[in-house]
Image (cartoon, coloured by chain):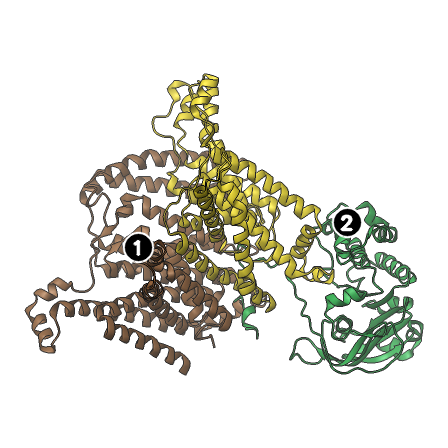
Chain colours: A brown, B green, C yellow
Amino acid sequence: MTMRGALYFALVALALLGTGLFSSWTVALTILNMGLISAIMSLGVNLQWGYAGLFNVGVAGFVALGGLGAVLMSMSPVGEAWSAGGGRLVLALVIALGTLVGAIALWKRLSRYRVPALVVLLLVGFFAYRAVFDPAVEAIEAVDPSVTGYLGGLGLPVLFGWPFGALLAAGAAWIVGKTALGLRSDYLAIATLGIAEIVVAVLKNEDWLARGVKNVYGVPRPVPYEIDLQNSTRFVEWMQNWGFDPVVGSAVVVKLCYSALFLVVLLALIWMAEMALRSPWGRLMRAIRDNEEAAEAMGKDVTRRHLQIFVLGSAVCGLAGAMMVTLDGQLTPGAYQPLRFTFLIWVMVIVGGSGNNWGAVLGGILIWFFWVQVEPMGQWLMQAITAGMAEDSDLRSHLLDSAAHMRLLTMGLVLLIVLRFSPRGLIPEK
Amino acid sequence: MSGNPYQDDRGNKDATITNPSGRGEIEVSTGTGHGSHTAEAFLIGDSMTGGYGKSGPDILHDCTVAVNKGEIAVIVGPNGAGKSTAMKATFGMLNLRQGSVRLDGEDITGLTPQARVVKGMGFVPQTHNIFTSMSVQENLEMGAFIRTDNFKTTMEQVFDLFPILRDKRNQPAGELSGGQRQQVAVGRALMTQPKVLLLDEPTAGVSPIVMDELFDRIIEVARTGISILMVEQNARQALEIADKGYVLVQGANAHTGTGKGLLADEEVRKSFLGG
Amino acid sequence: MDFLNALVALTNFVIIPATAYGSQLALGALGVTLIYGILRFSNFAHGDTMAFGAMVTILVTWAFQKMGVSIAPLPTALLALPFGIAATAALVIGTDRAVYRFYREKKAAPVTLVIVSMGVMFVMNGLVRFIIGVDDQRFGDGARFIISARDFKEMTGLREGLAIKTSAGLTIITAVIVVAALFWFLNKTRTGKSMRAYSDNEDLALLSGINPERVVMVTWLIVAALATIAGTLYGLDKSFKPFTYFQLLLPIFASAIVGGLGNPLGAIAGGFLIAYSEVAVTYAWKKVLTYSLPESFAPEGLAQLLSTDYKHAVSFVILIIVLLFKPTGLFKGKSV
């Protein structure tokens, strides 16, 4: 990292410190924690875009899958639901998978009549699947719908959910990449756009899986609960010794625990990414990016490398998604908006500096800081603009209500300005 | 990584978001301060020195090419001698550090390629020289885009010159054979009624029979009073029909003379025509 | 068995809604495909351009309604449409001047423009939400139906009613007129041909004296008109909500790509293919099947293949299938 890069990081730290000092430390730490997660997401996208020029516009989907991973690992299993329809559901999924595998095998084996055979197989498989699946789902979702109504998870510590979330995202990425990469040219962008939409739709509608739009609450934590800290006399004494309010102190300590955890993951990822970049593998990736024909002529399997890095990057996004669900303590499928979880991440990568891991991290934290802080700034700006207007003016109330949308406008402007005047980003690739 | 950060696409070739076909590559680069006086040639690129881009290395070194009214001038030379570059320089696609380009006595060194088209120059690139998705007739119409008068007669003249195009006028140009495509390309350039026509290797990639026919047509075009400046790989055949020939070596004039004269020149024959 | 009633039910619940939706997608996809063909990038801001155009049309419609101007039985929005188009044209041409032109001059890689269009998308999205808010807006007026279900039943004596909403009828007619006009323009006029020439071969177009900036301006103008018309018709037919326009991006891109990117004919075919499959797969076929099958075969359930929440999945799957077997799309598109 250069002097300039260090300076930018210092500025971001200063901004967070300022927020802590003038607003509140919980706010500052909340921003920092989500900023760290955003940084991991942009690391993932940077891996794909910066190293290999792969255009992933389905980040939201991979992030959501990661969140699902955390839920599936950490929530306690709902025994009643399993006995009501668990077995049948698994059977239905096996039928679905079997049909697909059979269809692919059929397509490869047969040469004559393969289209009609395929159609028949798919139709039969589909109806068999629905016949088993529908009643099973109904039974599962009927089990205490206000609290559970789903199968639950494995009941393991949530930290196991992180690699599992990454794995889920990687699996989805493999399927997408396998189909969308490596024809004469790619069609990855549209494929990722579609898969993200589908993943989020599945999460919203398949209540048996993760309660759909009813959300999963109470995802276990890897760190202590505030209330436990407040009840611990040792902690209260400790806080009082330092002269802090135990209630505020407990919130700050919990958030600091998260920050430490996220920071460890982030640093580990950066270290790995940097090592990978300097390894022969990384050099090959850059060689492919800079001159694909030449790399191909040297006998390098470009498509395989692209698939590799696409899966890796998506896994990182999935990891971040799992971390986010852990931090929030809940999975809310309705929240995975592409603007927030795909395009905002792109703004982070481009503003930070495509191809530079430190840039991606900087962009992640910086843009997240702005994303959060633009709203109060907009609110303040609107107050200032409308100060002279009559109390009951329609325009005044409209302007005040609209201040929340300032952040989209601002993010767009930030992206456009950086692209124009500093197209390589704040910390350019060396 | 290229010098222009906006052109860095990181190797992305995602066809669902970007469309690589038909992109423009022409870099308009013109202008020097220096002028000089030479012959009464109709088109002359005079003592040209320069290269591509603002800071690119010089490819041409004090190179001069010229063509008189109604004559055919041919630029020949070994690979990488700067033949095409010399011709492109006369068309405003090179950054000239020295020298000038004049058309019919007027200094056009500072004009863009488009402006030179308006002044009466026609240019047929070596590749990508037709609109493949458009019909033959539409190709010719596009050639006449800058004309505000009725160009029906010009189109008839082109059809008379290349009768096969009349038969295929409604066919997409991309479906034609190599030789026919070249005819469309030349026809398109003729539609502006140019005073001088620049041809960049018009016979590249066509069979010898088609090549002879194309040369015949080019002579016919020249007879109508249009000056022709042409770059050719097939040096011997080209020099046979040339009024004037330029042999370039490493961006500089090596030999200059009439077509016949160069063909007879012992040294030219030895070094460039294979004996 | 009752084929006549089955046919009416099919027309009422599948064919008419799908044709209207297909027309809206086709108009949207035409805009995307024109930008792809001429400016050579996929415009992520297209959904939001549609939203902006529809928004201006709505605001003007409201103004007309307040003034009591009306062209009943047609919706007032039709009268407001030219204003919407003008405002959108001003916006996109202004955006081109302020943003895109710079990158053209730098001969930027198309993917740079894609990223730029993301920035524009954010700005336009914010702008629309800022002006009109995020809520559902209704602005349709005039007659609600061309034929109502009851009238149809009385007329024909059938059990099944056929209702044609004014907005659906209007959408289809407008789409036909707009598409015909566009094709006439592209194939018959000098400017239209110069656009095709520029799309085909930029350098040669330049050498032929075609002014690239003019081609680009005309393209944006047409795109603004297409986007506004598509956005307004969609809003009239369903409802106006900024977020749904953003979500339309996927089916619109899918339509353009399935048809063959850069090919206007393909955009239309793609739009209808996507719309018909979306409606067919997410429609509950119980009624139609009950009419058309012998009684003993009548389905017990809704006979719905997928819940409507998965309609975008359908466009996606169709897209993947087409690309796997025909990488250039149904009609020959540019590369892929």
Residue beneath disc 2:
B137
Q: Secondary structure at mark 1?
A: loop
Amino acid bearing label 1: Asp
Q: Answer yes or no: is residue C169 visible.
A: yes
| Residue occupying the far left of the picture | A233
Q: Return the chain for callout 2.
A: B
The amino acid sitting under disc 2 is Gln
- Pinpoint residue C137: horizontal percent, then vertical percent: 39, 45
Which quadrant: the N terminus of chain B? bottom right
Q: Which one is in front in this view, the residue at disc 2 or the one at disc 1?
A: 1
Q: Residue at x 47, y 69 (%)?
A: A417
Relative depth, front residue between A13 and B116: B116
The quadrant in which residue B143 appears is bottom right
Q: CA distance from mark 2 to mark 1?
A: 67 Å
State the residue position of label 1.
A392
Q: Are marks 2 and 1 on the same chain?
A: no
The percent position of residue B128, horizontal first and vertical second, equals: 71, 60
Left or right: where C265 falls relative to A228:
right
Q: Is residue B41 left or right of residue C9?
A: right
- Label 2: how many Cα within 10 Å (few below 14, some 14–19, many 20+): many
